[in-house]
Image (cartoon, rainbow, N blue to C red):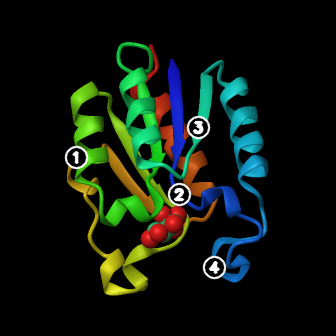
Amino acid sequence: LKILVVNGPNLNMLGKREPERYGTQTLQDIMATLQVTAQQHEVHLEHVQSNSEAELINVIHGAWQQIDVIIINPAAFTHTSVALRDALLSVAIPFYEVHLTNVHAREPFRHHSYFSDVAVAVICGLGAKGYEAALLSAIDRFAK
Ligand code: DQA
């Protein structure tokens, strides 16, 4: 099973960014922990973070026929990007949408997602554990 984790804009600032909201772990910390879980289950895990919408789209295109499942935190693009949604649909790779925070308990503009209706599942409000939950579910549902 090959899994790609994609993190969108500003998530490279985790640890520094609003720590009371997003926690004190860096993205590197979170991905290192996830890599341990992946290795325990003999899953191949790749990770990309970008602040650029174009780069995220290109990364998703590159996953076509290479990757079985995507775990994506589109960050602010969640609420704005038809293009990123279309990229995921174009490669037809099942994906999990993850948010560290409970976006529904935040500003109204965060309540709508361009991804949720086409995601396998949406996990929000579990902090970094949300990635772990998505990974374990992906192994359970898509392992071959
Ligand atoms: C986020 C929630 C988004 O609304 C926000 O723009 C982010 C992070 C989260 O993980 O909670 O950058 O996706």
Point 65% across, 24% down: residue: 41
Query: Which residue has dot 4 on it?
Result: 21
- Name the quadrant containing residue 43: top right
Q: Tell me the amino acid under the disc marked 4.
A: Arg
Q: Tell me the amino acid under the disc marked 3.
A: Val
**How far separated are the C-alphas under marks 1 and 2?**
21 Å
Identify which residue, 32 or 89, lies in the foreground. Answer: 89
Identify which residue, 81 or 43, lies in the foreground. Answer: 81
Q: Mark 2 CB in 8 Å range of ligand 1? A: yes
Point 61% across, 65% down: residue: 127
**Left or right of 139 in this view: 107:** left
Q: Earlier in the sequence, mark 2 or mark 4?
A: 2
**How far separated are the C-alphas under marks 4 and 1?**
27 Å
Q: Earlier in the sequence, mark 2 or mark 3?
A: 2
Q: Residue 27: image x %, image y %?
A: 71, 53
**How far separated are the C-alphas under marks 2 and 3?**
11 Å
Q: Tell me the amino acid under the disc marked 1.
A: Val
Identify the mark at residue 118; answer none if there is no mark.
1
Q: Residue 1: image x %, image y %?
A: 51, 18
Q: Mark 4 CB in 8 Å range of ligand 1? A: yes
Point 70% across, 43% down: residue: 31
